[in-house]
Structure formats: C-alpha cells, structure tokens
Image: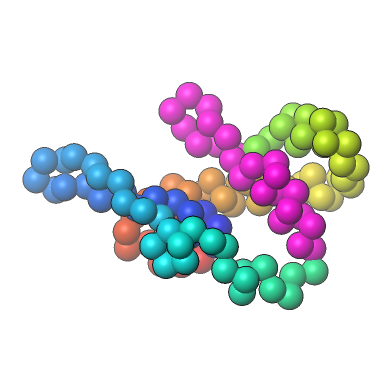
Amino acid sequence: MLAWLTTPKVIVNKKTGIESVHPSRLETNYGNVMPDFLLKDLEFTYLLEHFYELGWCKQSGDATVPMDWVDIKAWSDVTETNIDAWESVTLVEMSSAYVSWHYKAKDMDCPPP
C-alpha cells in the first residue's frame, strides 16, 4: 500500500515515447500526509516506525532495490535498536514488497493493493 501511494505516476506519450512524471497518489489525494486509517489498529506499529526510519528502499545504480541484511544491521547498530531475527526478516520482506509495488505503481492504471 505504501509504494502504491508514494510512487509518482509515470505517463508515456505513445506518439513520442517521452515519459512525464506526475505527483504520487499520496500527494494528490492526501497532501503528502500519511492518512491515519493506514496506521490505525496495527499491533506492530513500532515496526512501521523502524521501517520509516530505516528507509523503505535504497538506490543501486539506476535501480530502486530493497534494503538487505547489511542495511538493517548497520541501522540497528547505529541507532542502538535491538531487534529480533523475526523483526529483521519482516523489515526485509516489507522493503521487498515496497520495491515490488514501487515498480507496479508506475502504471497509472495500477489498482490499489
């Protein structure tokens, strides 16, 4: 859901092949403020806070890629945040899901997750 909301829309002119980037769904619909209904009634909201602080993804060359174990370990060491193995796995999976939706959501006709 986060990637679908935060990824800018890319429109390709079919005649010229030129891409134009438009504001994300979050910017367009919510003024770039995360709506409360996305965070309501979640048991593990601290993981979302860790995810925001860690970063949803990273750049590798021209590509957006998920965070990996090294990134999570470095973040954990620098912030002195102790996390369990299952939390690390969850953060890696959240980042992978975000990146997957990041690429899918570039299509204007992409349905919400």
| Image quarter hosting the N terminus | bottom right
Q: Which residue is pictured at 69% across the width and 35% down the height?
A: 68
Q: Which residue is pictured at 67% across the width and 68% down the height?
A: 39
In front of the other: 71 or 26 = 26
Q: Is residue 64 magenta?
A: yes
Q: Start and end of the magenta stretch?
A: 44-66
Q: Which residue is pictured at 88% across the width and 36% down the height?
A: 80
Please identify the quarter of the rendering in which residue 48 is found.
bottom right
Q: Is residue 30 above or below residue 92?
A: below
Residue furthest left as drawn:
15
Please count the marks in the image.
Answer: 0
Q: Which residue is pictured at 55% across the width and 58% down the height?
A: 2
Q: Is residue 103 magenta?
A: no
Q: Does any portion of residue 73 appear in the rendered image?
A: no
Q: Does any portion of residue 29 appear in the rendered image?
A: yes
Where residue 64 appears, as percent x and y from the top left, is 50, 36
Where residue 71 appears, as percent x and y from the top left, is 72, 32
Direction from residue 94 to residue 89 in the image, left or right: right
Q: Is residue 40 above or below residue 10?
A: below
Direction from residue 100 to residue 110 in the image, left or right: left
Residue furthest top as drawn:
61
Colour setting = rainbow
Where residue 110 appears, as percent x and y from the top left, is 38, 62
